[in-house]
Amino acid sequence: MNSTRVRELRGGPSSVRVSGESRSEFERDYGRTVYSTPFRRLRDKAQVFPLEPNDSLRTRLLHSLEVSSVAEDIAAQSAREVIHAEPHVTDDHVRDIPLIAATCGLIHDLGNPPFGHAGELAISTWFQKTFKNDDKFFSGLGAKHSSRVQDFFTFEGNAQAIRIVSNVELLVHEYGLNFTAGTLAAAGKYLAASSELGKNGWHEFKKTGFFTSESEIFEQVRSVTGTTGCRHPITYFVETADDIVYCSVDLEDSLRRRILVWDDVESKLRSLTSDDPLVLRVIKAAKAHAHPLVEYGRAYPDALAQTFRVAAISELVVAARQTFQKRYDAIMNGEYHLELLMDPDSEARPFINACKAILRADVYRHADILRLEVRGRQVIHDLLDLFWEAVRDYEPTQQGRVSPSEYSGKLYLLLSENYRRRFEERISADRQNELYWKLRLITDQVSGMTDTYACRLHKDLMNG
């Protein structure tokens, strides 16, 4: 693998710098993310509880900010303690590494559709259902297991995030947000095209890393940064931060919402881990720090939920840094294919597995969540039905626009104007892959919606 100093090459020309500006290119990537529309939309996308009226619980926006904070923390400490020891690493590198991690933490969920992971499944199952009803639906895209077909059969939010920042969300030209190669490479959590899933036992090949529409830029970025066939080292920090945050915070929010009770959580954590030392330290710290909060007026369940989250994140960050240091050479050589927290030698592994088991059994299957996920599936399927009708027979007029006189034309004009313009440019330049761009358009449209907007539009179009 190349130097930890990742290249700053962008896909297109960078925006003009004003006189006196001293921001690095990686600082500009961070700023572009914060001010982007997809990032703002995360405020109304579910983390665990779709359409949650309690505004103290996490949305995808708050989750992403927390992941960014933890990723930056792990990266900064690792850069100072481990990476800085390399002879070719400078102070600038030590500054850039946590900044890239922070940016990738912000964008890691940009591609999540309405209703979270249930929304991902809903998009995939719509395409699978449509193909089952019409086996010629994908005619012209290749065989059933080709990338162009599997892009839709196995819709993946991580791949959609790569698509958004490099293709969909336009800044001033066709290169999306026009991130540096370093940031884009670190944002690529998975390596495989959709047609390569399951070809080997590596973690990266369990999910789609990029869609066919982004394959060229993805491979160029890998080549520039020296990460072809392997993950960027910073990716491990972001993935670890995501696991740390969602395990601890989803439990915290579930305790606050009274879906879980502390005594049950403590009992299950101890039982599932056979009183693992790290688990006992987290529990002890949570109880010790909860009592002062109660004295200041906090309800004991809420105080425990908060102090549990603080203690858990602190312990898990330390464990992640230790594993990174232990596996540093393998990571830098592109030979490490595990997750830092799931490493066989990781002190955090029992705790993380126990948290995930509790969340799967007692939270993600809770009746309130399941009802909303079922509702979300119907919303997404109905909207895809309507928008497919809008683009199915699309033919540009001589003026370059569809006629609104037909019903499909009316539906077409309900699609995002920005998405439509991008689609019309694509289809004019690449009529051979017309079907692929039509399916990309409706997928971009629906996956970009917030939970509330999707429900409101569905209600308006389906007469309640």
Image (tube, rainbow, N blue to C red):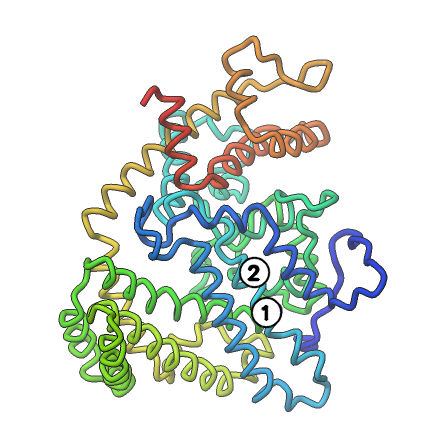
- Badge 2 is on which residue? 188
Q: Residues within 10 Å of mark 2 (few under 14, many from 20)?
A: many
Q: Is residue 373 left or right of residue 40?
A: left
Q: Residue at the front extreme? A: 296
Image-quadrant location for residue 347: bottom left
- Please, what is the three-letter code of the amino acid marked with disc 1? His
The residue that appears at 47% across and 40% down in the rendered structure is 447
The residue that appears at 62% across and 48% down in the rendered structure is 214
Secondary structure at badge 2 equals: loop
Q: Nearer the viewer, residue 192 or 266?
A: 266
**N-term mark: 1 or 2:** 2
- Badge 1 is on which residue? 232
Q: Is residue 100 left or right of residue 252?
A: right
> What whole-number distance in Å separates the C-alpha atoms at marks 1 and 2?
8 Å
Q: Is residue 366 left or right of residue 166?
A: left
Q: Residues within 10 Å of mark 1 (few under 14, many from 20)?
A: many
Task: Name above or below for residue 133 compared with residue 104.
Answer: above
Expressed as whole percent of the image width and height from the top left, the position of residue 169 reads 62, 44
- Please, what is the three-letter code of the amino acid marked with disc 2? Gly
